[in-house]
């Protein structure tokens, strides 16, 4: 963990922290994978999870065999989003993985100042991710991912490159995992108009713990967005999630993100903002997951994921 923090300090010493979001490509913050989303996006200490492609890439290490996953997201305002990923073992314990994530905003009609139609377009975003992860002695996992993203609005477009690095350390005797990483560090390549966009750089540390006398797995993450401070101590956000195993085939999940406080209206309504919940069903052939995330005044997001190990 100290090595990771030292690397991040060397890579990003000149980036000024700012209050308020000041980035483009905010769809990089989207939580992909219904299991992770149902647990409030607490991915820092996740292990054996193909969704490390969009979270902590170290979590890819330890996947058993070849793994494929598909996620469909019914987004806010009925935007449509999806993800498909694949991981392949290499060497004794390594994993290489690739995935693509898309966002479709539907069709928009353009009008001139008089209200006459001048055409239409379908804005969209997509991200291509490649990652490598490995483990040392079964306890220390590390991973790195590179992401190319592109956004289009009518004839305008912008693209960027970003990188994420992460580690996870396991303590088997305590059934505990500790993870940390630097995520979405990058810069724009081409601008919509004149100014290239920043990517939503963030730092995260988290712990996952299987309780000794309950079939309950808890995850807790601390998050710092480089270009956005929370109203909490140190400008940090936090997230807490849990997975309760009702049976060998059925799991119930829940979570809460502190960012939900910022999604309430002036009167404090939308008290469920930041809350998430979901279910997981393990069949003989597939792992099927579902999740719902509440975003207060903005609405809710529903996800469905299907994962297959070959």
Image (cartoon, rainbow, N blue to C red):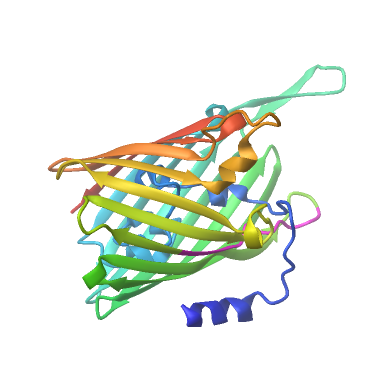
Residue plotted at (62% across, 78% down)? 9
In this rendering, the count of numbered labels is 0
Up/down of 73 relative to 307, above or below: above
Judged left or right of residue 70, residue 44 is: right
Taking the magenta stretch, the answer to whether it contains residue 202 is: yes
Give the dominant element type of the magenta stretch: helix, strand or loop.
Answer: loop
Front residue of this view, candidates 264 and 57: 264
Q: Is residue 35 visible?
A: yes
The quadrant holding residue 227 is: bottom right
Front residue of this view, candidates 132 and 159: 132
Give percent across and percent down for residue 149: 57, 54
Judged left or right of residue 153, residue 101 is: left
The C terminus, quarter of image: bottom left
Give percent across and percent down for residue 82: 44, 40
The quadrant holding residue 262 is: top right
Taking the magenta stretch, the answer to whether it contains residue 146 is: no
Give percent across and percent down for residue 123: 62, 36
Q: Residue furthest front?
A: 213
Give percent across and percent down for residue 111: 78, 22
Judged left or right of residue 272, residue 133 is: left
Q: Which residues fall within the magenta stretch?
A: 194-205
The quadrant holding residue 235 is: bottom right
Q: Is residue 199 visible?
A: no
Judged left or right of residue 202, residue 128 is: left
Q: Residue furthest left?
A: 284
Up/down of 157 relative to 229, above or below: above
Residue plotted at (74% across, 60% down)? 18
């Amino acid at each position: 963990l100290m090595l990771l923090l030292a690397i991040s300090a060397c890579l990003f010493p000149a980036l000024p922290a700012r209050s308020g979001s000041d980035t483009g490509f905010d769809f990089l913050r989207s939580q992909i994978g219904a299991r992770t989303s149902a647990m409030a996006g607490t991915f820092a200490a996740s292990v054996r999870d193909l969704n490390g492609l969009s979270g902590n890439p170290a979590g890819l290490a330890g996947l058993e065999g070849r793994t494929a996953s598909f996620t469909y997201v019914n987004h806010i305002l009925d935007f449509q989003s999806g993800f498909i990923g694949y991981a392949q073992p290499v060497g004794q314990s390594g994993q290489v993985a690739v995935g693509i994530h898309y966002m479709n905003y539907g069709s928009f009609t353009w009008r001139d100042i008089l209200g006459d139609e001048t055409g239409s377009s379908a804005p969209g975003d997509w991200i291509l991710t490649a990652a490598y992860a490995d483990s040392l002695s079964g306890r220390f996992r590390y991973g790195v991912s590179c992401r190319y993203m592109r956004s289009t609005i009518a004839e305008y477009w912008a693209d960027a490159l970003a990188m994420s690095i992460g580690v996870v350390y396991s303590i088997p005797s305590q059934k505990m995992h500790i993870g940390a990483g630097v995520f979405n560090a990058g810069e724009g390549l081409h601008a919509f108009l004149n100014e290239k966009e920043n990517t939503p750089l963030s730092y995260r540390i988290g712990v996952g713990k299987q309780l000794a006398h309950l079939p309950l797995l808890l995850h807790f993450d601390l998050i710092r967005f480089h270009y956005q401070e929370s109203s909490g101590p140190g400008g940090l956000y936090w997230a807490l999630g849990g997975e309760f195993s009702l049976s060998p085939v059925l799991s119930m999940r829940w979570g809460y993100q502190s960012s939900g406080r910022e999604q309430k209206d002036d009167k404090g309504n939308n008290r469920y903002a930041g809350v998430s919940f979901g279910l997981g069903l393990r069949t003989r052939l597939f792992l099927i997951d579902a999740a719902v995330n509440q975003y207060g005044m903005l609405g809710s997001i529903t996800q469905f994921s299907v994962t297959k190990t070959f």
